[in-house]
Image (tube, rainbow, N blue to C red):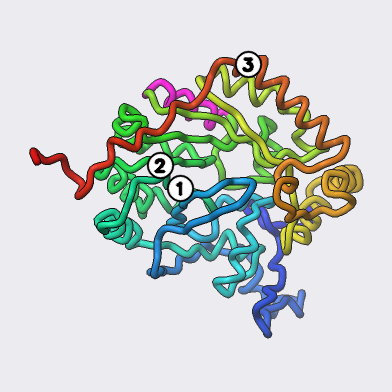
Amino acid sequence: MDSTYHKGRGAQINTPNPFRNKEYVQEHIEGLDEEMISNPQTKLFHEDPKNIISEYDSPDLGHGFSINPYQGCEHGCIYCYARNAHHYWGFSAGLDFETKIVVKPKAAQMLEAKMLTKNWEPKVIQLSGNTDCYQPTERKLKITRSLLEVLSKYRNPVGIITKNSLITRDIDILQDMAKDNLVNVMISITSEDESLRRKMEPRTASAAKRFETIAKLSEAGVPTGMMAAPIIPGLNDHEIPSLVRQAADHGALSAAYTVVRLNGAIGELFEDWLKKNYPDRFNKVWNLIRSLHDGKVNDSEWGRRMKGEGEVATAIAQLFRAAKKKYLSNREFPQYDFTKFRKGGNLTLF
């Protein structure tokens, strides 16, 4: 391993930001830039956006709404599609993405103001549509918990996806909402191989901890599933049956997956990471990823980008489908109940 390898970080470099004319670069390996490149520390940047709820509409995800209390993510997952969005904040998709975190401390107040508008109708709001709402800094800032408190007060449905066991801190709110069919949770798990997980998702909970999280939420009556995303052929595709079985054994009601796609700066970042961590497997894995996307490592085509195409993509789909049929048949999430919405936030006699 390179002596300059940043342990505890996924990206090892900062790729250029296409919106910036000038970049900080490492020109003098002798040490003149040592302060800039060694042991990067996490910094928080406060932001008060005009709108806290984002609306999306795509053939892959459908029409929906999401809130991202954080932009950038200290989990440092090397494959994360959200890395490219960090360019819009003036940062790099590389180390900047996991060390320069934009936080929205007034998110809950903005959400409540939205709930109180006369034209607001209850709709499912997704937390972590872009970056993880339970990333490490949430332990201290509690922005996600404050959002859940507002959603619970108004009985507005919510969906959550996370790979952090910190979500169990909020079981009191989630259990209360689950009684009225107002919440679904997906726990993201990509590998039971701790060596791979520590390199690929360096600041996340272990797979064992995540399966334990599924169990705790399920036991509390919170509908929970497992998201295996992304599946990377040559690295974790062989784990599909075990991941689905373990999720089912711990109480999961559903499972889903996507395949890896390396759009924008993520291609360069993942290539650098793969060469440094798995040089002996680089050519095999890189070519298998290309086989998913018609000879490229990236794909933005609606309806195809999430699952890929070709023989490898077909094999992954068949394996996942067989595992779901074997371990999760006759299980499904309950439907959200929109009738529980409280206009004004409290029940009244009139």
Residue at position x 47%, y 64% from top? 102
Q: Secondary structure at mark 2?
A: strand
User: Against 163, is 265 above or below?
Assistant: below
Q: Earlier in the sequence, mark 2 or mark 3?
A: 2
Give the number of the mark in front: 2 or 1. Answer: 2
Q: What distance separates the C-alpha of mark 2 from that of mark 3?
A: 26 Å
User: Which residue is pictured at 69% across the width and 20% down the height?
Assistant: 323
Regarding mark 3 in the picture, which secondary structure is present there? helix
Would you name the residue on which mark 3 appears?
327
Task: Name which residue type carries label 3.
Answer: Tyr
Determine whether the residue tagged by mark 1 lies in a helix, strand or loop. Answer: strand
Crowdedness near tag 1: few (<14), some (14–19) or many (≥20) residues, C-alpha within 10 Å: many
Mark yes or no: residue 279 visible: no
Q: Looking at the image, which residue is at 75% across and 35% down? A: 236
Q: Are marks 2 and 1 in contact (CB under 8 Å)?
A: yes
Which of the 4 image quadrants contains residue 16?
bottom right
For the C terminus, the quadrant is top left
Above-or-below relation of 4 to 294: below
Locate residue 34: give its quadrant: bottom right
Query: Which three-letter amino acid code belongs to the residue tagged 2?
Result: Val
Q: Residue 91 at what x, y percent from top left?
A: 59, 71
The one nearer the camera, 249 or 200, is 249
Magenta stretch prevailing secondary structure: helix
Image coordinates for residue 337, horizontal then vertical, percent: 36, 33
Residue matched to label 2: 158
Between the residue at mark 2 and the residue at mark 1, the CA separation in whole angstroms equals 7 Å
Q: Is residue 257 above or below residue 29?
A: above
Q: What is the C-alpha distance between the residues marked 1 and 3?
A: 27 Å
Q: Magenta residues?
A: 208-220
Earlier in the chain: of badge 2 and badge 1, it is 1
- Say if the magenta span includes residue 214: yes
Tag 1 residue? 127
